[in-house]
Every structure is written in C-alpha cells, then in structure tokens.
Image (spheres, rainbow, N blue to C red):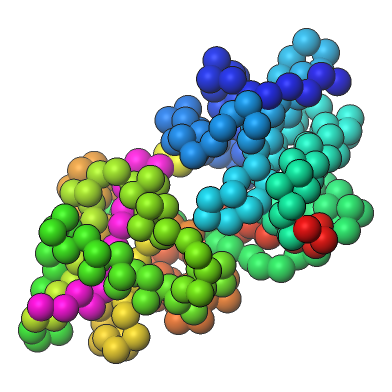
Amino acid sequence: MNARPATEADAPAVTALVRAFEERLTGRPEQSEQDLRGEWDGLDLARDAWVIELDGRLAGYGALYTDPDTFADGYVHPDFWGRGVGARLVDLGEAEARRRSTPALQVPVFGNDARAHALLESRGYRPVRRYYRMEIELDGPPPDPAWPEGIEVRPYDDGEAAAFHAALDEAFAEEWGHEAARDVDWRAVRERRSRDRSLWFAVKDGGEIAAALVSDEEHWGVGWVHSIGVRPAWRRRGLGEALLTHSFAELYRRGRKHIGLGVDAENPTGATRLYERLGMHVASSFVYFEKDLGG
C-alpha cells in the first residue's frame, strides 16, 4: 500500500474513483472532474490531499479541508473495500490535523455507508449531525412565485455585495457550523463555491435585502442551490418559498430540470418542510462524525 500526495495529474483517476464509490452506495455517480478541481482550488495538494495505490491501481483518495471547517473527506474504490485502505485514510487525515494542532476533526460519510460508520466509531468518532441532499425533477416550468406586496426579487448587484453577504450571514447565524461568532470569511467561501453571479438573487424590501440566494447551473451533476436564507425579521411571509421557486425557474430556463441542495436535518428554521412543500425529496443523507484530537 503506497500513500503519496495527490497531484493535478491525478484528477481524472481520482474523479473515476469517487464516481465508482458513489455509484456503489447511491446508484448514481455525481462527482465530475470540474467539481473535484473546484474543491482543489482551496487546497495545497502536496500537504492537504493524498492518494493510496494498491496492486498498481488507485485504491483510495482523501483530503483535509480547513476553510471554513476542518474536516477530512475520504473515498475507497469498491474493488478495494475490506483491505485497510479506509483505515489508512483516517490515519493520514488525523496525522495532518494533529500537526496543525486541530482540536477536533469531522468526517462526513454517506448515511448508508455502514462500513465507514463502524470504522470511525472504532477509532473514537461519534455522530454529531446529519445532513440531507434534497432534489427535485421538474416536469415543466415552475409557477410564478407569489411575492408579498412591496417585495421584489433582483439579480445580484456587486455594488450591494456587503449587504448581500451580511443578509446571508444573519440568516445563517443560528445554523450548526456557521455561528457568526466564528472567525470565518463566509463571503469568500460563497464566492469560491459559486462564481456565476447571474444565479445569485436578492429579495428587496424597499432599500433592504430581506433574503438572498446563491446557486450554480451545474454542481455534482445537477443545478445546485448553495445557500438560501431569509433574515429573521422577514420570516414566515413566504419569501423563502418564492425565492426558491424563482431560482428553480431560472435554472429550468437554462435547461436544468434536476435541481438539488443540501440541508441540515435539524435546521432550526424548518427548511426541510419548505423544500418538501415545493416537491423536493431526500435523495441521500450524510452523517458527520467528530473526534476530539486534544489539540
């Protein structure tokens, strides 16, 4: 078993490995090389990502992310399950996290990946959160959204960038992992994740941004909503439903009928119920495991 740093030249093979892993667990591969390279934009591959070779083939891939959260992600090709590749990936992630004096490490895994659950629990990890990937397959253009009187949706305006991101920060202040007290530049995170500003929208009430949405034409093989948030003072007025419907319509206009998003299963604003009302369903789930590293 040979472990080494990942390189740019590994991108096609790593993508194929991840897709084989996803297909075995979910029945549908999602990762694209573009997705992978987007993730690598925020990494120093020589330090943050590694591959494992076994029997002359790429058997495993892992990476350590530290912006905005510290977590290790890992994949083992199904042909090599049960041969210790996953355990080696856990060792590599922990070792690098400890070198950086990280107090705790999180590892997200598919909800139905019983092998990964057992491995992590045997290494002292505990489940701390569950996320859903929710999706919808549109069979036609969505209906026109119903906006309350005096409320309108506008395309993102770079001149209002500070207010736009502040609105999302306020909307997500109570979310697990997003707490405003953390020293995280969420604006930089959003701008790195979604560069197509034509799919960013602001809901305006007079001169104030009441809600905002960031989406992408393609991410993980579907149209993707990265962030949608309504500021507390404007909640329970239908703005979230109208804004998401508006986003669906724009993605549909661009040929995207299959649309997805991720959501905390314990979302404090009840977002999962909103998404279900719009016809979305849970396509897969992810469990975040965490271990105290004593850093």
Against 62, is 230 above or below?
A: below
Residue 2, given in percent of the width and then of the height, sits at: 81, 19
Residue 117 located left or right of residue 190: right
Q: Residue furthest right?
A: 122
What is the x, y in percent for residue 141? 20, 56
Q: Is residue 43 left or right of residue 202?
A: right
Asked whether residue 210 is drawn in magenta, I would say yes
Q: Nearer the viewer, residue 166 or 115?
A: 166
Which residue is at a point 37% across and 76% down the rendered structure image?
Answer: 171
Task: Name the magenta segment's main secondary structure.
Answer: strand
Q: Is residue 40 above or below residue 248?
A: above
Image quadrant where residue 62 sits: top right
Which image quadrant is residue 86 in?
A: top right
Q: Position of residue 207 (x, y in %)?
A: 10, 78
Closer-to-camera residue (101/194)? 101
Q: Nearer the viewer, residue 269 or 22?
A: 269
Query: What residue span does the magenta drawing correspond to?
Result: 207-219
- Please tell me which residue is depicted at 40% across the width and 42% down the height of the picture: 219
